[in-house]
Amino acid sequence: MKFRSVYVRIFVLSLNLATIVYSQELNYLVYDRDQIPNFIYRSRRDKLVEELGKDAVAILYSAPERTRNADTEYRYRQDDNFYYLTGFNEPNAILLLSGRGMAVADLRDSTRIDTVKEILFVQSPNPRFEQWAGRRFGPEGAMKLLGVQYALAIEKFKSMFPSVVPMAAVKYFYAANFAKETTGRISELLQPVRSTIDELKSIGSQIEVREPSSIIKNFRVVKSPEEIALITRAAHISALAHRQAMMSCKPGMAEYELQAVYEYVFGKSGSEYPAYPSIVGSAENSVILHYNTNRRTIADGDIVLADCAAEYHNYASDVTRTFPANGKFSLPQRKVYQIVLDAQNSAIGMMKPGVAWRDVTAKADSELENGLYALGIVKEKNNREFRRFCPHGLGHAVGLDVHDVSSAIMMPGIVYTIEPGIYIPDTIPGIDPQYFNLGVRIEDDILITPDGHKNLSEEAPREIEEIEALMKQKGIGGLPIE
């Protein structure tokens, strides 16, 4: 697969969206020219309806808005499955799907009845609200800009739900789990659905209540060319940020200063969010797997482990690099780093369609164990002792989620992280002190292609000599701001 052609395809397919720059009628702006086009989302909904069958109804809903403190909310992030089916990023929305069809009033002639297989309930336009919090699609925008067959104001959901979903014609009622954290307005809007489910269970109805997430997640395992293009973009942005962080790193900087370099490059390159809280751990913090306090001052001779990556149009990347604060690996750092790099290279070299994930993991584990044994850090082999220093798995799939749905057997179109790591704290007795507080993780995003694999984050150097050469250059993070 040639990735340049993927980008071209994305651009061409997106022209229907990109040409809608501003609609005075809808009062809605569309800025990004590389969004997945709406007919892709429509095809996903059609596929789900076909999978569920004519005797089924499904209901999915947007992620709740979450309060950070007082009257401040966390920045909104859509539910993965809901976004996969709609491409819609607004809160307080509900999607109804029916294989048999739902009777609704014809939007062009209210005296006529139409039958539709999908209804998206969305927030109504509200100029006063939108002046504070931004524009809304509204029902008309949902149909014109998202390509939804039928859309209505969310206020109509409670009254319409019983009539558009007649349970007499339903054998299977698919409803996404109502998690405890589903609070706020969306929780109130879904009350009729909760009541329906409770009633079906209490009367021993023949209608079977099912959860649709597993079906949707199966659809999400293999990524489409459009999704691969967005993940590739996210990984490219992450690699650029790692390069700038390496060039910017100097003893005396705070960990949060390097974090700022990463997140500046993310934003500068069009990423809407970091894919996860940025991890920048130096010295004793490099051995903490998910450290993200990022407040320590980096000292001369420290190792820096930076697990920082961008999300782009809701698609994640996940990239880690480890480098010396002063630009030159010490001998202990070099030895441990090379073991991790050899393990990663061995694992990546095996990746192709048909290969089992467990076999790739076993290869990396063998490299890590043998390397630690050769250094004398592991005293015995074949007894899992090396797991004291390598506590996590080899990797995971990446997509709409950082830890995305996956397959045990590799298939073209799946993106995996390969992230072996060694972490040597100063609390384990019998270890040569020269290795204390030394954590090394190297992580890349690897796409399985029809004939092998492609490293999507390879622009960020991994070889020791390449890292040291790059760190001699001047990055964007060293300039004073006061």
Image: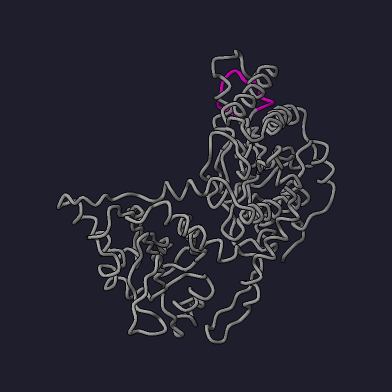
Find the residue positioned furthest to the left: 203
The relative height of residue 359 versus residue 472 in the rendered view (above or below) is above
| Residue range highlighted in magenta | 424-435
The relative height of residue 245 versus residue 90 in the rendered view (above or below) is above
Tell me which corner region of the image, top left, top right, bottom left or bottom right, holds residue 102: bottom left
Look at 54% across and 83% down and name the residue there: 27
Tell me which corner region of the image, top left, top right, bottom left or bottom right, holds residue 269: bottom right
Colouring: one colour
Measured as percent of width and height from the top left, residue 13 is found at 65, 65
Look at 36% across and 61% down and name the residue there: 98
Look at 77% across and 32% down and name the residue there: 330
The mark tally for this picture is: 0
Measured as percent of width and height from the top left, residue 69 is found at 41, 64
- The answer to which of 459 and 409 lies nearer the viewer is 409
Measured as percent of width and height from the top left, residue 368 is found at 65, 24
Tell me which corner region of the image, top left, top right, bottom left or bottom right, holds residue 348: top right
- The answer to which of 416 and 150 lies nearer the viewer is 150
Measured as percent of width and height from the top left, residue 280 is found at 63, 46
